[in-house]
Image (tube, helix red, strand yellow):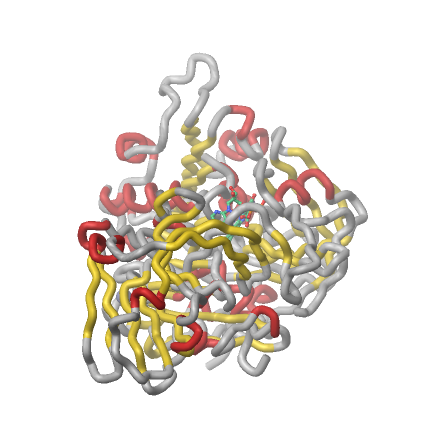
Amino acid sequence: MTDNRLDGNAAGGALREVFAVDLTAATGQCSNCSQRLALAESRLYTHAPGLVGRCPGCDAVLFRLVRGPGRAWLDLRGVTCLQFALPGAT
Amino acid sequence: MSVIGIVSPGFSGRRRGGAPDLPPGQYLTEDFPVLSAGPTPHVPKESWNLTVTTETGAAHHWDWAGLTALPTERFTVDLHCVTKWSKLATAWEGISLDTLLAGVETSAEYALAHSYGGYTTNLPLEDLLDGQAWIAVRYDGEDLTPEHGGPARLLVPHLYLWKSAKWVSAIRLLNEDHPGFWESVGYHNYGDPWREQRYWGD
Amino acid sequence: MARATVLGRLTWRVATVAAVRDETPTARTIVLDVPGWPGHLAGQHVDVRLTAPDGYSTQRSYSVASAPRGDRLELTVESLPDGEVSPYLTRVLSVGDPLELRGPIGGWFVWRPEAPEPVQLVAGGSGAVPLMAMIRARTAGTAAPFRLLYSVRDPEAVLYRDELRGASEDGSGLDVTYAYTRRAPEGWPRPPGRVDAGLLAETAWAPELAPACYVCGPTGFVETVADLLVAAGHDPARIRTERFGPGGGRP
Ligand SMILES: Cc1cc2nc3c(=O)[nH]c(=O)nc-3n(C[C@H](O)[C@H](O)[C@H](O)COP(=O)(O)OP(=O)(O)OC[C@H]3O[C@@H](n4cnc5c(N)ncnc54)[C@H](O)[C@@H]3O)c2cc1C
Ligand SMILES: [Zn+2]
């Protein structure tokens, strides 16, 4: 049976509620296995109390996003050094 | 209640009932939704193990035969998930934590449950005792499936269901509280559904 | 297309259903007027939020089907028999009704018309929706040749059939292969079955051409196809996936 998961891409809406840039297209490094990836490439688990993004290489937790009334929590401890493209900026 | 949008004409959502005896903000469900924050661990009974460690470092181990040799209880309880569904009168079979911990010497105040797959959740040790918590091994007369946390899960029905760690592998008894997987990212440290303790500060 | 990169936090908007169009017996396209829609890129999605009178609320993601050019937004939704949201969107929601959504979302699973490399699209069931947006986003100046491998349960379940036929016959550089999983049309050269290594080798761009691959559909389908593409020698960095979930339109 396939686990019930999506691509990290599907977290884009919830993340854009917090950030002005698209975090899913940012690339980072898995703190567990050092693989570099875009957050959109993570395995996203949504049937849970929050959104959980895991490394496609080693299943380690990359990020967790919890949304409560009027508040959101984001834990990114599984990813190091995010790189963003800044379209239009120099 | 979270931000309410405009009402969608003709939308009622998955069939759900209210019931007079539900905790605040909960909806009644008849099916058993499967929540998972990661790949479902498939742990064969032959290699399954449960470890309890105390604040002094003493470790107690049970393999499957050892666990199931302990007296089991049948119990029927209501489940309340923080994602707002409640399921009433679910029938389980398992080993009371009172039984499991009977021979464990400890003066710890806190417990941190660990699961196969890396999940953790914390709760006061006293909430695991006095007939309030079990290591469940059967649901509705059947062995517990991996989707529902089999071969064995923690069940602490008086708290939100995220406290009932599926695929439980260890319980650490600690002098200090240590927030678990959800407790460290916004979810309430204790999680009493009747006081609607969903998030930090609730 | 610069409009689509306007930055800022996303908020919910209230769209109005301008038209609905049945694509198949189980799938419907919903045409929406979205005040202030900033434009989108092909492949992006929106989140849709439904709210019941008692305050119960739930949300799902839907890919944008329409080309970035139009001023109306189109979604195509496949109705799942036991689903909570898709039967509402395909059967209850009517012209004139409001629909809450936020978007456009995602800067990763997108195709930009200026990208020169060949494009290999692989769709399973309703996974054809964002890939159709890519096909529709091609312009007269688009250099990239497109191939679509479309896995679908039977001929009646094909989305956008006529439009795909037109686009593959007009010399615009689109090639479509259907893989029927349950029932093929009379006289079809291949018995019904799943996409496998042989079919990919026969119909997809060769790995040596370094195509950009976009794979979309139910989670199991996407994982199978992505593995097959990697095994065939495609660079994993060139394979972009969009999983629709366990039931997201069976292929
Ligand atoms: C980025 C993205 C884009 C998408 N684009 C489209 C699109 O363009 N068109 C389209 O038709 N769909 C699309 N989908 C899928 C869509 O979001 C919905 O998942 C789909 O419409 C089904 O929703 P539903 O409420 O009808 O079904 P649900 O009620 O969500 O049920 C779906 C299926 O999952 C099962 N299920 C539900 N909950 C659980 C659970 N907790 N555990 C295990 N199984 C469960 C159900 O039994 C059912 O088979 C997209 C998904 C994503 C992530
Ligand atoms: Zn990793």
Tell me where residue C41 sits by quadrant.
bottom right
Q: Residue at x 34, y 42 (%)?
A: C225
Compared to residue C59, the image places residue C189 above or below, namely above
Q: Position of residue C95 (x, y in %)?
A: 78, 44
Q: Position of residue C27 (x, y in %)?
A: 61, 36
Tell which of C245 and B126 is nearer to you.
B126
Compared to residue B88, the image places residue A75 above or below, namely below
Q: Quadrant of the N terminus of chain C?
A: bottom right
Compared to residue B6, the image places residue C228 above or below, namely above
- Whether residue C140 appears in this view of the structure is no
Q: Position of residue C224 (x, y in %)?
A: 33, 42
Q: Residue at x 59, y 70 (%)?
A: C6
Tell which of A62 and C9 is nearer to you.
A62
Tell which of B148 and C53 is nearer to you.
B148
**B49 relative position to A73: left or right:** left
Judged from this view, the residue extending furthest toward the bottom is B176
Q: Position of residue C39 (x, y in %)?
A: 62, 60
- Whether residue A39 appears in this view of the structure is yes
